[in-house]
Amino acid sequence: MKEIIRIDIIVLVSIMDLKNIEWNNNSYQEFIEYLKSISEKKYKEFSEKITFTKYEMLGIRLPKLRSIAKDIPKGNIQEFLKYSKNTYYEEIMIKLLVFANIKDIDELILYFDDAINLIDNWALCDTFCNSLKIVEKNKDYFLTKIDKLVKSNQTYHIRVGLILLLCYYVEEEYLDLILKYLDNIKSDEYYINMGEAWLICEIFIKYESVGLKYLEHNKLNKFTINKSISKIRDSYRVSKEMKDYILKFKK
């Protein structure tokens, strides 16, 4: 009997129109049952090895989560958020993608801080930042947010700031500000340092002379500068001669 009920729920949710659904406790539970039905055990096991999170993982691939998240903003976001929970990693990812899909900056502002506070791992952070295309047309506003994030004492607040800079601000007019942020971040947290290294690598690739000067004169810790050099040397967009040359800056 239980198996029959579960199949009925899965069938119901699989044909749900997420654009017009009336969210309530029952429909949200059906939504969770659907997520469970499309989960993959092996993918869950793989994800748990590379992503450390306080949320329980189901094991659903990102393209499926993106597809689900595209339809929800076309309906009633407020009702969806009212009934949604923060139990599963995939729930959080969907929420973040829903926020990222909002086209109205005034509406997104209402949710941005709450979205950041949900993030507790690199995958949620980087996927949210990469998906937040609204930043491109609202750079001044988000720069005020980034300024607060990179000065935070919370690991994933800082990482969000760094990845937003990486995705949308590696342009000539922002380089001095980015390098200043990098020098002022004092942390030995792995995911902060990796975010810094990734950002430095992108700066080097796009603005080699600026990146080269920064490698020579910076206030980074040993891990971050060495990881930055490693990432630059891994890039196919940097010449072999330059890859060999920057080894002199290793600590």
Image: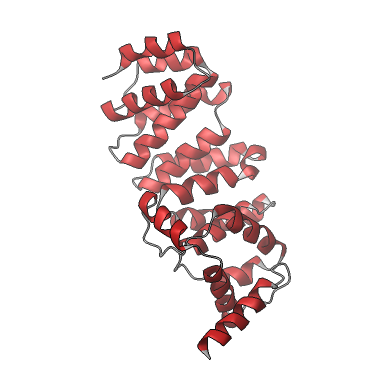
Q: 228 above or below 49?
A: above
- Number of labels in the image equals 0
Residue appearing at x 53%, y 84% in the figure: 3
Please tell me which residue lies in front, 246 or 2.
2
Please tell me which residue lies in front, 82 or 140.
82
Image position, residue 65 (x, y; %): 58, 58
Q: 153 above or below 30?
A: above
Please tell me which residue lies in front, 22 or 138.
22
User: Farthest residue toward the bottom?
Assistant: 1
Q: Quadrant of the C terminus?
A: top left
Q: 175 above or below 149?
A: above
Say which quarter of the image contains residue 118.
bottom left
Image position, residue 142 (x, y; %): 56, 41
Residue appearing at x 72%, y 70% in the figure: 17
Say which quarter of the image contains residue 44.
bottom left
Colour mapping: secondary structure
